[in-house]
Image (cartoon, rainbow, N blue to C red):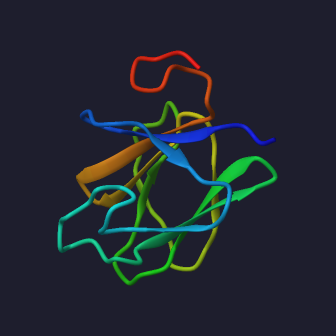
Amino acid sequence: MSAIIQLVPEGGGETIDVPDESTVIGRGAFLKVTDKRVSRSHALLEVIDGKLHLTPTHTNPCFLRRKNESEQEVLQRDLRQMLEEGDVFGLLPDQLFYTVSYGKGPVNGVKR
């Protein structure tokens, strides 16, 4: 059984459990994104050996801030990035950011 990996939306919202299989993210039901600047297949999330990986798959980039760093980097298309606890990725330069959590805390205020 693998650890529970979650995405915590910056600015509030419900915590999202990441499934163990590959998941296409972008505009749609999984992240509850409706902004048309975000592609329906913006990026791919994969859990590999218990770690979350993000691969941007669209011409519109993804953005990454490593834990405890203020610098934001633009991720290269089709280049997989491993995400650590506390890393933050976004689908737009200034919004739709999610903090990666490896299941250590409560989910929406409820302890597991």
Q: Residue 35: where, in percent of width, then height?
A: 18, 66
2 relative to 20, above or below: above
Q: Residue, x 36% and y 55% (percent of image)?
A: 31
Q: Residue, x 57% and y 79% (percent of image)?
A: 78
Looking at this view, is 70 or 29 the one in front? 29
Whether residue 6 sits left or right of residue 14 in the image: it is right
Whether residue 51 sits left or right of residue 44 in the image: it is right
Q: Residue 96: where, in percent of width, then height?
A: 28, 52
Q: Residue 27: where, in percent of width, then height?
A: 30, 69
Looking at this view, is 53 or 17 the one in front? 17
Q: Residue, x 46% and y 17% (percent of image)?
A: 110
Which quarter of the rendering shows the N terminus? top right
Q: Residue, x 81% and y 52% (percent of image)?
A: 49
Picture quadrant where residue 36 is located: bottom left
84 relative to 77, above or below: above
53 relative to 78, above or below: above
Q: Residue 71: where, in percent of width, then height?
A: 41, 45
Looking at this view, is 101 or 20 the one in front? 20
Whether residue 91 sits left or right of residue 68 in the image: it is left
Picture quadrant where residue 46 is located: bottom right
Which quarter of the rendering shows the C terminus? top right
Picture quadrant where residue 91 is located: bottom left
Q: Residue furthest bottom?
A: 59
